[in-house]
Image: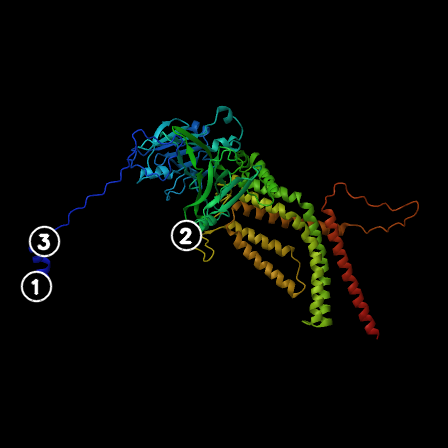
Amino acid sequence: MLLWFGWLHFLVPKLWPVVPKPRVPAVSSVEVDVPADATAPENAVVADTEQPAVAPLPKHPVKSVWLGPEVDDDKQKLDEFFLAVKFDSRGAAVNTIELTDRARYPAFGRRDKRLRLVGSDIATSLRTFELQAPAIDALLKSETLDRIPWEITAQDKTSITFRLQTSDGRWELVKHFQLEQLTEAELKQPHVRDTLARGYQLRLTVTVKNLSPRPQELSYTLRGPVGVPLEDADNTYKYRDVRMGFFDEDGAGIDESKLSAAEVVKKVKAKKTELSKRPIKYIGVDVLYFAALLIPQEDQLKQRTIDQADCVVVAEDKQYPQYSDVTVDLTSSKLTIPANDEIKHEFVLYAGPKLKELVQQVSAGAVMDYGWFDSICRGMVWLLNMFHAIGLSYGVAILCLTALVRTLLMPLSKHQAKHAAKMKELQPKIAARQKELEAKHGKNTEEYIKASQELVAEQSKMMLGGCLPVFLQLPIFIALYRAIGSSIELRMEPFLWFENLASPDALFALPFKVPFLGWTEFNLLPCISAGLMYVHQKLTMPAPTNEEQAAQQKMMSFMMIMMAAMFYRVPSGLCLYFIATNIWSMTERWLLERKAKADAQNSPPAPPSSPSGPGNPPQPKKPSPFSNWWYSMVEAADKDVSIKKKSLNDDDSNDRKNKKNRGKR
């Protein structure tokens, strides 16, 4: 075998070498005879499918350029510019956008750093205002418009211009960015950073030039804001949302909607990224306190420049999809550009806080989502800012706001306390009635169960009169809850031992992670709040008269524990409100009960009523001119309680008569 192997692979190739085959010449391309004076039709459009010429890549250096104050040393720039923007010549895109007001808007957990509102995700390669155009990308071959360095042709204090021209001389693209600078007159206005949306705007003008002697077609895709920061993701109740405002069919109104990050991830995985093809008023990404919204400047009803909007996943969180970073892509309409002509599209990026006066100036008021009780919630925020304006910290302002609201609601609270006292008076009679039913029908019999259900139904109707004031107060309490939970004024505001009223107080870090709940810090305020709520419940809840009520009260106690777990991660400002309102409620109840006992001891006996006669007719009591609409509901509830009380007294009297008659027999 070894000899055969050596013979076949070593000796045979040397003795009889293989003659190589002759090389076949390459087939030349077919040449078509075209007259020398032949020209294209005057209005012919060069199709996108035309074979592009291979062009060398433009050679421009990669640079990073700032508009606005790069650092906080220049006080003049900090006043004149609300934003500091860092550009990258690679792709002529925006790397980061920072808010210059570090005192009011510091980075989360870092008071010594400015907040980076756009470009916070350093792990992604996507950037804001990247541009893609298939017709030009095909000419660049190995590069694309969003990765190739552009030429910086002009730069000054407030603007920068990028240019890219294909080497075949057919196309030229220009991106001109303009950062808004405040004038001296605007700087003198009070609260200018809270009222002037123009200071938070970055303007972009996209110019597409057709340098060829024939009309050409092109469409491009512009990337929206990338890297809007999700602050305190473990404790927030709102994550990144894609916010959209589209014109109605008649153009009279704006149809505003949102899409959560988790929903965007689902749509991208299902390859259903299209958001809408309707005319766009604004579109972008928002979080709890900030928004980055892109607004086309052309009237999209008259001059439709954006054909379609799509959602994009910038960075997906596999474990928690709601934490994913998302953005949008805007695709232009198909543009037909005449020979040696150009088109311009203008956009404005609003990157700033979610304040009512600011977002309304860009027609995006819907991003201020206060829920069902929007008007009441806005009033609460106004009161909160009013207390802060007189020199109080926001922690003290929350306490003052709670005291003011509870003072205004004191008439309802007073009625609720009176109703609770009446219920306590009825409890012994209800308990006695329950025992009589048990003695009469026997326990767990059909008659006993039916009679007990009727008694419980009567008691529930009486309790409903006491719940009525609670229902009337509920919208106010919910509005106060939403106002404190979504007010940007509380962000990074310290009070007592906690550093941020918009986050849990985090007294100290736990040495372990709580299973199933994921808690890693000990929050003291929720524990205090839950304890006060439990004590308040015990003080206001009457003693049970049967096993069903006892079971219901045990269930309520269990629900209190569940609520304490649910509220463990709420912002410390909300816990401060819970603590204040529970202390107020218990103190108010104690004072009302004490006053009622004192009035009962000191009140003289009622004088006998004088008979009415012709000379002394009874004078009807006139209703108060200042009574509100809910007094009729209160009187109806009191009347219902009196009827039920009289019914119980009559039943007791009848039972005594029946027993007496049976004794005589």
Eyeballing the image, is 142 above or below 650?
A: above
Q: Which of marks 3 and 1 is nearer the N terminus?
A: 1
Considering the numbered disc 2 on the image, is that residue within a helix, a strand or a loop? loop
Image quarter hosting the C terminus: bottom right
Marks 3 and 2 sit apart, C-alpha to C-alpha, by 61 Å
Amino acid type of the residue that numbered disc 3 sits on in the rendered structure:
Pro
Q: In which quarter of the image is residue 14?
A: bottom left
Marks 1 and 2 sit apart, C-alpha to C-alpha, by 62 Å
Marks 3 and 1 sit apart, C-alpha to C-alpha, by 20 Å
| Callout 1 crowding tier (Cα within 10 Å): few <14, some 14–19, many ≥20 | few
Q: Mark 2 points at which residue?
A: 318
Q: Are marks 3 and 2 in contact (CB under 8 Å)?
A: no
Task: Mark 3 vs mark 1: give the one in front.
Answer: 3
Amino acid type of the residue that numbered disc 2 sits on in the rendered structure:
Lys
User: Percent position (x, y) of residue 605?
Assistant: 81, 52
Q: Mark 1 points at which residue?
A: 3
Q: Which residue is drawn at 65% across and 57% down?
A: 541
